[in-house]
Image (spheres, grey):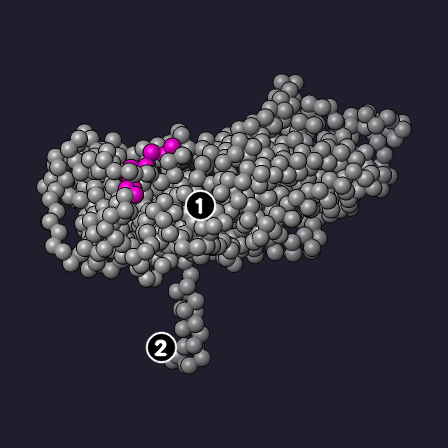
Amino acid sequence: MKKINRRDFVKLASAAGAGSLLPDPLFVLRDAVDQIIGPKKTGKEVEYVPKPVSGAKFGMVIDLGKCIGCRRCAYACKRENNVSDSISPPYIMVFETESATGTTGHFASPEMKGKGTTMYYTRLRKDKWYMPVQCNHCDNAPCVQVCPTGASYKDPDGLVLIDYDKCIGCRYCMTACPYGARRFNWWEPHVSRDRRNPLVPMRRHGVVEKCTFCVHRTRRGKFTRCVEVCPNRARTFGNFNDPDSKVRKLIESERNFRLKEVLNTGPRIWYLTKPKDKHMQWYRPLPPFKNIRGIMHE
Amino acid sequence: MNNILDKFRHKNRSFYIFIGILLAFIAVGQFNWLTYLTHGPGPTGSSDMVPWGIYISGLAYFIGLSAGATIVGLVHHAFGRHDYKPIAIRAILVGLVCIFGATQFVLVDLGVPFRGLKVPIILHNLTSLFLVSSTSYYGFMVILGAELYFSIKVLTGKASEREISISKWLGILAVPYALWVVHAFTGSIFGVVKAREMWNTPMLPVHFVISAIASGFALVIMVAVITSKAEKRELLSSDTYDHMGKLLAFFVLVTVFLDFFDYFILRYSAKLEAMETWHIITTRYITTFVLNIGGLVVAFVMLLFRRFRTANGLLAAGIIIQIAIISYRINLVSVGQLAPLFPGMGEIQYIPTFSEILVALGLIAIVILLYTVLSIVLPVEETVEKPIHKVREYGQGFQRGKDAFSAPDHAAGVFEKGFHKE
């Protein structure tokens, strides 16, 4: 066998280095076949999306008087839904505002512009208001209307979901969403194996994803993760078709608004504006969570 | 096959250098696109706040070119301007390669492109304008292909009476299809998005159609002039150039009128989002804004003078119009998304990356290469001159009569048929 001298070795190594940067044509070919035929079915798939709950209409109420802007909901949501680190901002964006309606009312007006309202705050302040914004699961969702493949769909129980096996990544839904709620996998998503939630599917690069109202939990009777982790219980989740549910009572008794209601999208997140405790309560023992009333659970 | 290769044999060296440069651009662009396929479209400058980048601008621009190129068929067949005949088939070819280029821009933009090929048949949602427009692109390709087929048949004299009238009617009907179905619906893709203030206006489909006519017609004129220069002969008479210049001036005038009132109403309505958009247009995007309005005004003023309605003047005006329309597309797609949806989102940026620009240039090179090759391979115009020269050179003369050289122009075709290279 011919002996390899140093020059040859450098040549080989640089060729190998350049080769590793090249896109693998075999991978592209296999991926193309997968995209056209669809993923192989083994019959042992986890039921990622349970069937819609009949007779239910889910929705959320967020009490701005209680939100302290700690962003626990955003971080917990990221862990719960296997959201890759390459995705930024997370599903839940929290805005710091001067007033309770700062994010909707004084949009870009000279007085408010550049003052106070920001997504990138670093300190929590008691004199500010905080406003979490996420997918509103609209009744007339513009994203569902514009999706060319039917990958985005609205279920009868109020959830707007995405079928990752149908999404072609055209991002029309992202431009159509008035709330900036959708995220695109610009890179191959990466979540380490020990941190993955087995109930939530991993996405591939090139598809759109967003808040699902934790479909794997809520359709089994549990509350969403953001509701569970909120230290001040600013969030309430429930079935709006149930007249005795807490969400129903809250929006019937308190002053509330919905984001960009003028666009007639019918958002399913209501914001309460009543100024109440701006004090953190997490040191106080809060009652443990039960399941959502009347929803079938395992 | 040998016949086709023969057509390339007489080309000079600069032609092959030109083809080589195009191939290099295509190779670099496609290589960059392959990295998107393996690692995701991360190398583009788009983000979750600005999901659409220059590929969608390119889509809108190329759709406009293809739709506008059909205008020549209308002028030729419906208005009876038979002096447009030498570029009639070239115009169809321009339309065909441009619509192909537009679909390539969509394909490159998709996150899961091969799944996107299933769109009209297997995957569909009828309320989506992406579905309507992408289906209409396929239809447009079929119409233009049929038009090209019948026109070539007519040109080579193999067509029956029926086929001649079919080619004529396809040329006329392609115009309303291209403008109302293909391009107006592409404008509606943006027009229906109520989340973005700059896009959500019923003016947008109209605006798209008019700017499409201006840019597409200008491109066909540019192709005619460049072909004349490359082959060192006059493809069209100076009278035809004059007529083209007048038509183009009218289209440019309407475009600049709509442009002006689009921005005027945006500014005057003074909605909060509109103010934010206007602020971005007049600060960060002032270059493209000035290129858009200023370029169109300059082109219009140029075309008012007779001295610019010549081959060279029209080429200059055409280049200015292309730059203006490209600026308009970039302005529309980018600025439309840059106005933040909520005030706390900060200043949203979109800067196209090097990789993104390379892919786009590669796609443009594909379009130019396709046109160049097809215009050589296919019989795009009547080859009358060469056989006569040959005959005169070798002194053989016409066999069918002594007064062949003094025959009137319209009779020339009868005599020359025998000398065609079949």
> Residue B251: horizontal and vertical position, in percent?
68, 34
Rate crowding at label 2 as few (under 14), some (14 to 19) or many (20 or more) other CA atoms within 10 Å. few
Quadrant of the snapshot with the N terminus of chain B = top right
Residue at 32 percent of width and 33 percent of height: A139
Q: Is residue A86 above or below residue A160?
A: below
Rate crowding at label 1 as few (under 14), some (14 to 19) or many (20 or more) other CA atoms within 10 Å. many
Viewer-nearest of labels 1 and 2?
A: 1
> Residue B399: horizontal and vertical position, in percent?
83, 29
Residue at 50 percent of width and 49 percent of height: A110
- Whether residue B87 is visible, yes or no, is no
Q: Does mark 2 fall on the same chain as mark 1?
A: yes
> Residue A203: horizontal and vertical position, in percent?
30, 49
Local SS, label 1: loop
Q: Which chain letter goes with mark 1?
A: A
Q: Who is closer to the viewer here, B109 or B327?
A: B327
Residue A1's tag is 2
Residue at 17 percent of width and 38 percent of height: A246
Q: Earlier in the sequence, mark 1 or mark 2?
A: 2
Q: Who is closer to the viewer here, B65 or B411?
A: B65
Quadrant of the snapshot with the C terminus of chain B = top right
- Whether residue A23 is visible, yes or no, is yes
User: Spatial distance from mark 1 to mark 2, Cα to Cα?
Assistant: 75 Å
| A241 to the left or right of B342 | left
> Residue B409: horizontal and vertical position, in percent?
83, 27
**Magenta residue check for A269:** yes
Q: In terms of image quadrants, where is residue B97?
A: top right
Q: In terms of image quadrants, where is residue B223?
A: top right
Q: Who is closer to the viewer here, A202 or A88?
A: A88
What secondary structure prevails in the magenta region? loop
